[in-house]
Image (spheres, rainbow, N blue to C red):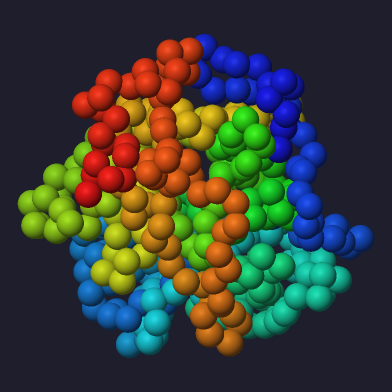
Amino acid sequence: MTDRKDMTLTSSGFYVSQEAPISTDNPVPTPISPPPDILRCAYMEIVVTDLAASREFYVDVLGLTVTEEDEEAIYLRSLEEFIHHNLVLRKGPVAAVAAFSYRVRTPEDLDKAVAFYEELGCTVRRNPDGFVKGIGDSVRVVDPLGFPYEFFHDVQHVERLAWRYDLYSPGALVRLDHFNQVTPDVPRATKFMQDLGFRVTEDIQDEDGTVYAAWMRRKPTVHDTAMTGGDGPRMHHVAFSTHEKHNILAICDKMGALRISDRIERGPGRHGVSNAFYLYLRDPDGHRVEIYTQDYYTGDPDNPVVTWDVHDNQRRDFWGNPVVPSWYTDASLVLDLDGNPQPVVAREEASELAATIGADGFSYTRRSDGEDSMPEWKQGEYKLGHQL
């Protein structure tokens, strides 16, 4: 996206630059209508095939609070949330995502959302009573990238449990932090999200300008959502924050003690991208959940964009630990507004998996030492053939 010659190499190994126009050969037209003023990612609605098993995972293991539940759905929130929910588990025949939901600043922003997406010819539906419990007047759309989005302002307030330390577990989840979406054309997706008012904070590129992923925010953190290159539209993960690293370690210990360590897909570790401590889990349907903590402030208007080289093995894990192939390939289906799975389009550009740990891929720790700088015993962790 940004030419490498316009970037500054930092002592930490990544590049920084000021945000530049996104280069894409297939842009979504920029609407004349102004976009809604998005505050933050607020909740995700996912479809699960076994509601009881999902409840056990999200409530008994991860400790989310039940706001309401019935035979068809469970409404969950994190400890510091004051709106009705951050996650809806809805029983259905196919595990998928029904909505990536954002709160907007004013009720009038819903009118803007309707005009913005109708100008693009998107499917738009509005329900003054809301599509789920606890949420008022709402707009749902299928965006030009194929993702189901919801926008809302009016909510039912519930008790914020931040002061109820008697309810805190060692691995307490305190906030919904972000979504991560899989899309075949990252520059196209990024340009569209910029039209929607998002700012890029970090990305992964190669020297030829291929963009493998981009992180974008509305609230002043590293991201409210990210666009990851791959076959899509699909949902890569939904992320909840803890206060400290030790909370994530406690979750690992708990899952080990419960003999469900096979649900731990990747981590714990520290990301290069975002600088956050992380853990990736898979729920009973395979939906990926990240537990996340300690990224950084991005709210200044001249906040520099961080660019990582795709071959830097510290971009995904700052300690240089390998990424399991499933993390690159697996993701959840997304639904249209009638509940049907959206068709998945293959990515045509190079995949990050192939570029770094595939048969022809390579990674490095110190770029100046060249492709063969990594010890042979370490290289085997990154080569897919060696892993198998």
Residue at 71% x, 67% y is: 144
Going by the image, does 209 lie left or right of 88? right
Question: Which of 316/50 is in front?
Answer: 316
Viewer can see residue 132:
no
Please tell me which residue lies in front, 4 or 222.
Answer: 4
Tally of marks: 0
Residue 316 vs 324, above or below: the answer is: above
Q: Residue at x 53, y 85 (%)?
A: 340
Q: Which residue is at a point 38% across and 44% down the rendered structure image?
A: 359
Q: Could you tell me residue 276's position as x and y percent?
A: 42, 34
Residue furthest to the front: 360
The image position of residue 58, as x and y in percent, is 29, 64
Which residue is at the far right? 32
135 and 147: which is toward the camera: 147
Where 156 falls versus 383 (above or below)? Answer: below
Residue 239 image point, x, y percent: 42, 52
Q: Nearer the viewer, residue 228 or 275?
A: 228
Taking 337 as reference, is 106 above or below it?
above
Quadrant in the picture for residue 67: bottom left
Compared to residue 302, the image places residue 244 above or below, namely: below
Residue 113 in the image: state x and y as whole percent: 77, 67
Q: What residue lies at 64% left-to-right and 55% top-to-bottom?
A: 185
Q: Quadrant of the N terminus?
A: top right
* Direction from residue 207 to residue 50 in the image, left or right: left
Q: Quadrant of residue 160?
A: bottom left
Residue 356: which quarter of the image?
top left
Q: Is residue 235 left or right of residue 37?
A: left
Judged left or right of residue 353, residue 339 is: right
